[in-house]
Image (spheres, grey):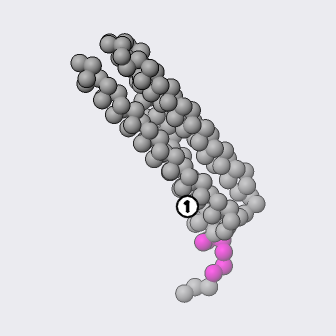
Amino acid sequence: MQQLILPQLKYEIDTYRRLLNFITDENVHLKNRLAVVVKDNFEKNLVEELDNYLSKFVAQDELINLLKNDISKIENRLWGQIHDDGEIVKDIYPGLTVLQSNILTTQELLITLCSDFNSFLWEIIVNIKWTTNYPEP
């Protein structure tokens, strides 16, 4: 049984690490998009809302770093107990369950944040389009 447990635990840890890397990449894209908006279409009346999104992106980074730290702690405990039959599941599994829940919550937060930010950008784009006097084609 021990031969099945260790590969499963390693697989789950690797999966969580990949998910966090994906979330990190998406958060970087959102911050880059924010930088482009500020650079290209900076309007003073949007400062507060843009700053609010930047704060949310930074908070997301902090949460990701905490989760990566949790993964490292679980992995260190796993390798520290690799020779103790049966103790691995009792000690590691509850931590993995909490970690999985936290990562899913973080993923949901990212999806919501991404959707909100894109909606905000669309509002800006539509406002610029309709409030700017461009010549008709």
Q: Nearer the viewer, residue 6 or 109?
A: 6
The number of numbered badges drawn on the structure is 1
Residue under the point 58% across and 41% down: 60
Q: Is residue 56 visible?
A: no
Q: Which residue is rendered at x = 64% and y = 60% of the image?
A: 35
Residue at the right extreme of this rendering: 44
Quarter of the image where the N terminus is located: top left
Question: In the drawing, does residue 13 fall left or right of residue 127?
Answer: left
Q: Residue at x 61, y 71 (%)?
A: 130
Magenta highlight on residue 11:
no
Q: Quadrant of the C terminus?
A: bottom right
Indicate the position of residue 94 as horizontal and vertical percent values: 41, 18
Which sits in the foreground, 68 or 54?
Answer: 68
What element does badge 1 sit on? Answer: helix
Q: Which residue is mark 1?
A: 122
Residue 103 image offset from top left, x and y in percent: 46, 34
Residue type for callout 1: Trp
Residue 54 in sight: yes
Task: Note whether 88 is above or below 45 in the view shown.
Answer: above
Locate residue 8, reporting x and y percent: 30, 29
**61 up-or-down from 99: above or below:** below
Residue that extends furthest to the bottom in the rendered view of this protein: 137
Which image quarter: residue 128?
A: bottom right
Q: Is residue 132 magenta?
A: yes
Relative image position of residue 132 (x, y in whole percent): 66, 75
Q: Residue at x 62, y 85 (%)?
A: 135
Q: Residues within 10 Å of mark 1 (few under 14, many from 20)?
A: few
Q: Foreground: 129 or 97?
A: 97
Tell me which segment is drawn in magenta.
129-134
Residue 112 as seen in the image, left or right of residue 9? right
